[in-house]
Amino acid sequence: QVQLVESGGGLVQPGGSLRLSCSASGRTFSIYVMGWYRQVPGKERELAATITINGMTNYADSVKDRFIISRDNAKDTWYLQMNSLKPQDTAVYYCYTFLYGAQEYWGQGTPVTVSS
């Protein structure tokens, strides 16, 4: 099992920045993909960004060039730096990991509100 704990969400004005963190514990040696998804009430959860253990990244078109995903393998932690935030980025952001062996785990979610 892997446990994920997110931090860093909150309220920010349009154009501002936030950094989300996700700390993993447990079978972290099996982690292959780390990432962030987001969900707005009434809509499906959608990809924001992922990064593999080897550093390959993937971004949703809606966040490309504004968000940066990174990881610290030694700390079993990954981050989502969110810049130039827009009201449409408002969502609950979920930390996600996919393990070798095809297991996946989710964090509890951290809310991000972009509003003036």
Image (cartoon, grey):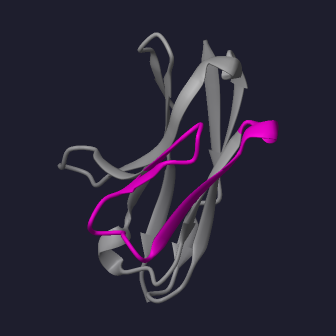
Point out residue 84 in the picture as x, y percentages from the top left corner: 46, 84
Quadrant (top left/top right/bottom left/bottom right) for the C terminus: bottom left
Q: Position of residue 75 (x, y in %)?
A: 80, 40
Give the magenta part as a residue range: 50-76
Q: Is residue 53 magenta?
A: yes
25 shown above or below 90: above
**As drawn, 88 above or below 28:** below
The answer to whether one can see residue 94 in this image is: no
Instruction: Please state the horizontal and vertical placement of residue 106, each as a whole percent of the image.
Output: 48, 30
Task: Work out whether 6 lies above or below 1.
Answer: below
x 64%, y 24%: residue:
3
Visible in this render: residue 62?
yes
Q: Which quadrant is home to the N terminus? A: top right
Question: Which residue is drawn at the image coordinates 61% and 55% (left, top)?
Answer: 70
* Tally of numbered discs: 0
**Residue farthest to the right, as pictured:** 74
Q: Quadrant of residue 10?
A: bottom right
**Was residue 116 drawn as part of the magenta stretch in this picture?**
no
For the point 41% across and 14% down, which residue is it?
102
**Could you tell whether 27 is left or right of 74 in the image?**
left
Residue at the (65%, 59%) spot, across then down = 8
Q: Toward the viewer: 24 or 71?
A: 71
Q: Is residue 67 above or below residue 108?
A: below
Pick the front one: 33 or 37: 33
Relative side of 6 to 41, left or right? right
